[in-house]
Image: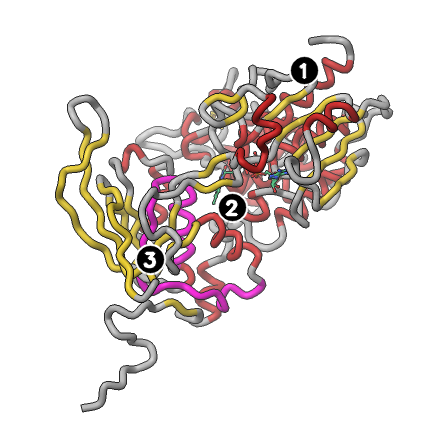
Amino acid sequence: MSNDKPADKPADNASDIRPGRLPDEQIAANFADMHPPLTPSEAIIDADRCYFCYDAPCTTACPTGIDIPGFIQKIRSGNLKGSAHTILSENIMGGMCARVCPTEVLCEEACVRNTHEDRPVRIGLLQRHATDAVLDIAPALFTRAPTTGRSVAVIGGGPAGLSCAHRLALLGHDVTVFEPRDKLGGLNEYGIAAYKTPGDFAAREVEFILGIGGIEIRTGAALGKDLSLKDLRANFGAVFLGFGLSGINGLGLDGEKLEGVVNAVAYIETLRQAPDKAALPVGRRVVVIGGGMTAIDIAVQSKALGAEEVTIVYRRGQEHMNASRYEQEFAQTRGVGIRTWAAPRTLLASNGRVRGVEFETTRLGEDGKLAGTGQSYTLDADVVFKAIGQNVSWERLADTAEILELREGRIAVDERRKTSLAGVWAGGDCVHGGSDLTVSAVQDGKLAALSIDRFFKGGT
Ligand SMILES: Cc1cc2nc3c(=O)[nH]c(=O)nc-3n(C[C@H](O)[C@H](O)[C@H](O)COP(=O)(O)OP(=O)(O)OC[C@H]3O[C@@H](n4cnc5c(N)ncnc54)[C@H](O)[C@@H]3O)c2cc1C
Ligand code: SF4
């Protein structure tokens, strides 16, 4: 009897990671736009559903405070340029946020039409309808004030940094953005799931933000390596820190360096930048450890590349997951399994490669703390993705950490996004107390810019 096995059926304990698990056209379809845009007539019909509430709860629920009934009213009257202006005046990344915001727990959850018998106005899609219509002419929507001669250093070209830079430039200040990578956009470019923002939308949005003028870009420049906060404070009138989170939380288990144990954010970055997704290798059996958006995104994208079995394992209950219920259900409809109340205990290896994970089931103890039950089960895996959160990676920013007040590993800021250091503001994922969403980073950047402007004018 021959021992030969068909090429697509490896021996049981051999790892099975390879590209081309699905036909190219299937992979392309799996990565297509998650929420295709509304047609003009669909937009009018949805705009007509809005009650134009006074003191609109949807606006209160929007972290950037967009006048939602105001922009919907303008769609209704055919004034898309005015509608986009209303949106972008509060949120310069209104186009990206229309694609990536968890509207189901923000504006659309608050919409008064969101009842058992009805459904909310599709605010996200309407916002996309308006902002997409003007993307190529958007710079013309805003006019930069005459230059004030004041200069600001912005550290990081992600949503927080770019939002801050745009508002400062609009107010006439001269901005220099320092960014280590070649491309701007931060996680909009490198992190957000490919099916939420297909094509080159992130890059096009950056282009229109920079179209305001007055923003100089220096790539290949990292704080802590090429720049010091001390020098920046000496050379600029103000500094904004928006460097996000570049460290990855570890599982705290032996074997994290095994082949096949992969940082989910790094793989997502590869996926976002890949010119041909069909060429990316993917495991047959994938286990994802975590319960947030990153866990959902890597699981869904592994499935989209053709992984046969994808399981998210989270140490608490489904209701405790950071990913919204909508995101969880989305993953489940894409064939991802979710197992809760289990924590990884051992990474199982064979010939230096991961071959599975042993999990211990968990429960809440009487003191309310998470405890192991002593019972365990094993999941076979060709790839194990770590998606249990990120951190600031202060070891690369030791000089900065020394002089700034931190809280729980992130920068402490007040409601104006001022740090403990005079002349230094911060926002986005690197600050304490935020919600780690694109829209919150944009709001932080805007608030910091307004505060810096007041500071330049002699206010506090
Ligand atoms: C996988 C993943 C999926 C996500 N999906 C969503 C989603 O669907 N919806 C949503 O709302 N949010 C999502 N988020 C969260 C969202 O992307 C972030 O909250 C947002 O990007 C934060 O913006 P930021 O500007 O603070 O940081 P970042 O986007 O991380 O940008 C920081 C910038 O600073 C630069 N930088 C880093 N170190 C330095 C340094 N030393 N010096 C100078 N510059 C530096 C980086 O290169 C980067 O360009 C997701 C996050 C991840 C990880
Ligand atoms: S809550 Fe709903 S109905 Fe009311 S203004 Fe907002 S989108 Fe319109």
Instruction: Give the secondary structure at mark 2.
Output: loop
Q: Does the image show residue 45? A: no
Q: Residue at x 64, y 25 (%)?
A: 446
Query: Given the image, on which type of amino acid does mark 3 rest?
Result: Val
Q: Residue at x 35, y 54 (%)?
A: 384
Colour scheme in use:
secondary structure
Identify the residue under disc 1.
422
Question: Which of disc 2 and disc 3 is earlier in sequence?
Answer: 2
Q: Nearer the viewer, mark 1 or mark 2?
A: 1
* Residue 362, x across and y down, in percent: 19, 37
Query: Given the image, on which type of amino acid does mark 1 rest?
Result: Ala
Indicate which disc residue 192 carries: 2
Is residue 295 part of the magenta span, yes or no? yes
Work out which quarter of the rendered image holds the C terminus and state it.
top right
The reply, left or right, for residue 57 in relation to residue 403 is: left
Instruction: Give the secondary structure at mark 1.
Output: loop
Q: Residue at x 76, y 38 (%)?
A: 139
Q: Which residues are magenta?
A: 275-303
